Amino acid sequence: MDFINLKKQYLEIKDEVDSSITAVLSHGKYIMGPEVELLENELKKYVDSKYSISCSSGTDALLMALLAIDVKPGDAIITTPFTFIATAEVVSLLGATPVFVDIDSKTFNIDPDLIELKINEIHSKTNLNIKAIIPVNIFGLPCDYDKIKSLSKKYNIEIIEDAAQSFGAQYNSQKSCSLSNLSCTSFFPAKPLGCYGDGGAIFTNDPDLNEKLCSIRVHGKGNHKYDNINIGINGRLDTIQAAVLIEKLKIFNDEIEQRQAVAKKYNDYLKDYFDLQYIPKDYKSAWAQFCLLAEDSLSREKIINYLSDKNIPTAIYYPKPLHMQEAFSKLLNVDLDNSFNITEDISSRIFSIPMHPYLSDDEIGQICTALIKVKNEL
Ligand SMILES: *Cc1c(COP(=O)(O)O)cnc(C)c1O
């Protein structure tokens, strides 16, 4: 059994993807070929955003967004410690300071009620200038953007939506990637919308930010290639990856619905046995991962081993929260409270089971039967 079945998806659209890639090989415009703009038009239509800037990865999307708002040493960026390293890595790369806020124990997203306390703590204990909040839509579930936006207005702080796991998700009637003035996503193969290599995109409604991001994407270029007006990066999306994504986007809505169906079946089978990620009313997850909580880390280990014996793959996102990573040991502000109890508890108990649009009822049955059996034996 596969954790994520990308082969099956490829076979579904093999002819379309093959001819789309072949078309790029024939016209030879490997860098910023016509498919790139075509894809960007489709992406911005999909999320209902004015501008879409494709780029080389989700990490570079975040880096470019931070560059676009001039993040620099002395700036604090508020985010969650329960995320992939990239979210906070780009902050430190620019010499700014990541400041973590603990998560909600049910949604696993940044706890909006703790953000304001942290803002006050930063103001009273440090000289840092709070530049932005990066809410991460963990496992595909959007954060509470109404609350985060009201804080953003009150304290004049930018929001950068980390939608690397949530392309296709919805908050009320709005699509993820349109939930803040700057939104970043990833097309890494295992994400809900993935290409066949690295890729990402940034979305904004602001024409000035769009222009700046297009410049940053190509070494900060000005009106011509060898005129540089910003410090930028080589952040372009390959034309071949754009060609793949154009075809994958055509079946993406169906895939998102299939993910909903899989999640519903998992939920029906498992809700009486395990705590699952809570999806609030009017939120729609893109189901990048389907996560369960074990009672403690020892029972998690037993469950995972039992499933592994039955040939059922599992994964742990994330076993070590960011505030406990060695990479950040010297980069966090020591005057702030850097203990995050909910995150540490969830990290010690969480695990995920196979999730993709092509899971069969038979596979779902096998997985849930095994989970319920091992749970009853614990
Ligand atoms: C995957 C991921 C990223 C980085 O995306 P890449 O395309 O792998 O660079 C950033 N943030 C989160 C939350 C992610 O899951």
Image (tube, rainbow, N blue to C red):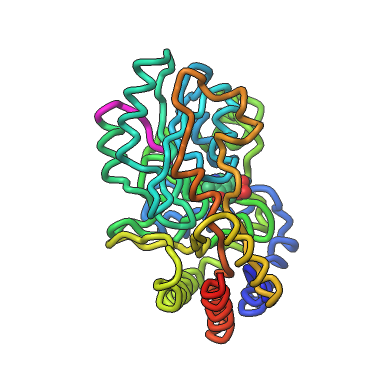
120 to the left or right of 40: left
Judge whether 166 appears above or below 14 on screen: above
Residue 54 seen from this side:
no
Q: Nearer the viewer, residue 53 or 33?
A: 53
Locate residue 346 relative to residue 142 in the image: left or right: right
Q: Residue at x 45, y 22 (%)?
A: 336
Q: Quadrant of the C terminus?
A: bottom right
Residue 54: percent from left, percent from top: 55, 48
Is residue 123 visible from the viewing direction of this image? yes
Q: The N terminus appears in which quarter of the rendering? A: bottom right
Compared with residue 273, is residue 72 higher up or lower down, i.e. above or below?
above
Report the magenta residues as a range.
154-160
Q: Position of residue 205 (x, y in %)?
A: 36, 43
| The furthest residue to the front | 378
Check residue 337 for magenta coloring. no
Q: Residue at x 43, y 77 (%)?
A: 261
Placement of 160 over or under 12, stated as above or below: above
Q: Give the residue at x 65% y 57%.
A: 241
Determine whether, in the image, residue 238 is placed left or right of residue 377. right
